[in-house]
Amino acid sequence: MSKHSQVIDTLPQVVASHLRALGENLAIARKRRRESRQTWSQRIGVSEPTLMRMERGDPSVAMGVYATALWLMGRTSALSDLAAPEHDRGALEDAVRAAQMRAVRKPSSIDDRLRP
């Protein structure tokens, strides 16, 4: 049995929803490949109960398990793109705000401009 994590208690509902969808999609992928739970769990390197929890989108299942399931589907390249800097809108918006703040300078006086 996995140990309880505070992260699970504070998991935003939207994140839990996306994890459930991911788990369901992984279950569909397994079924479309006509793989049994036993075979799929052996290929991933987990027990069948862990596979079943992953397919339900359980947040206590290690990310490595989800990643290995994606690898079996040929979708691991999508992992690195998830947090790619060019998709980090929050950081990009902060950078734009900082640039705008630097661009808005106190206008210098005529005396300051005429000084050598």
Image: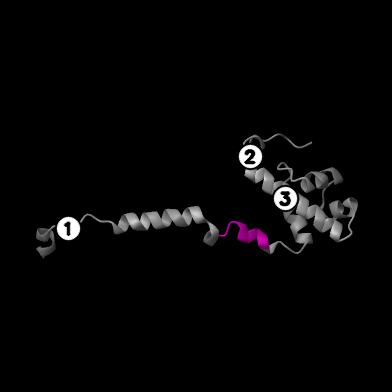
Q: Position of residue 74 (x, y in %)?
A: 75, 64
* Label 3: which secondary element: helix
Residue under pointer 2: 11
Marks 2 and 3: which is nearer the front? Answer: 3
Residue 26 sits in quarter: bottom right
**Over which residues does the magenta segment extend?**
78-84
Name which residue lies at 79% across and 60% down.
72
Marks 3 and 1: which is nearer the front? Answer: 3
Q: Is residue 21 left or right of residue 42?
A: left
Q: Position of residue 82 (x, y in %)?
A: 62, 57
Residue under pointer 1: 108
Q: Dot 1, crowdedness within 10 Å: few (<14), some or many (≥20)?
A: few
Residue under pointer 3: 21
* Label 1: which secondary element: loop
Query: Looking at the image, is mark 1 or mark 2 earlier in the sequence?
Result: 2
> Foreground: 58 or 21?
21
Q: Dot 3, crowdedness within 10 Å: few (<14), some or many (≥20)?
A: some
- Amino acid identity at mark 2: Leu
- Amino acid identity at mark 1: Ser
Is the image coloured rainbow, by chain, by secondary structure, or in one colour? one colour
Query: Looking at the image, is mark 2 or mark 3 earlier in the sequence?
Result: 2
Query: For the residues marked 2 and 3, what is the alpha-carbon distance in whole angstroms?
Result: 15 Å
> Foreground: 56 or 49?
56
Q: Is residue 16 magenta?
A: no
Q: Is the residue 6 above or below the residue 70 in the image? A: above
Q: Is residue 100 left or right of residue 68?
A: left
Name which residue lies at 79% across and 43% down.
53
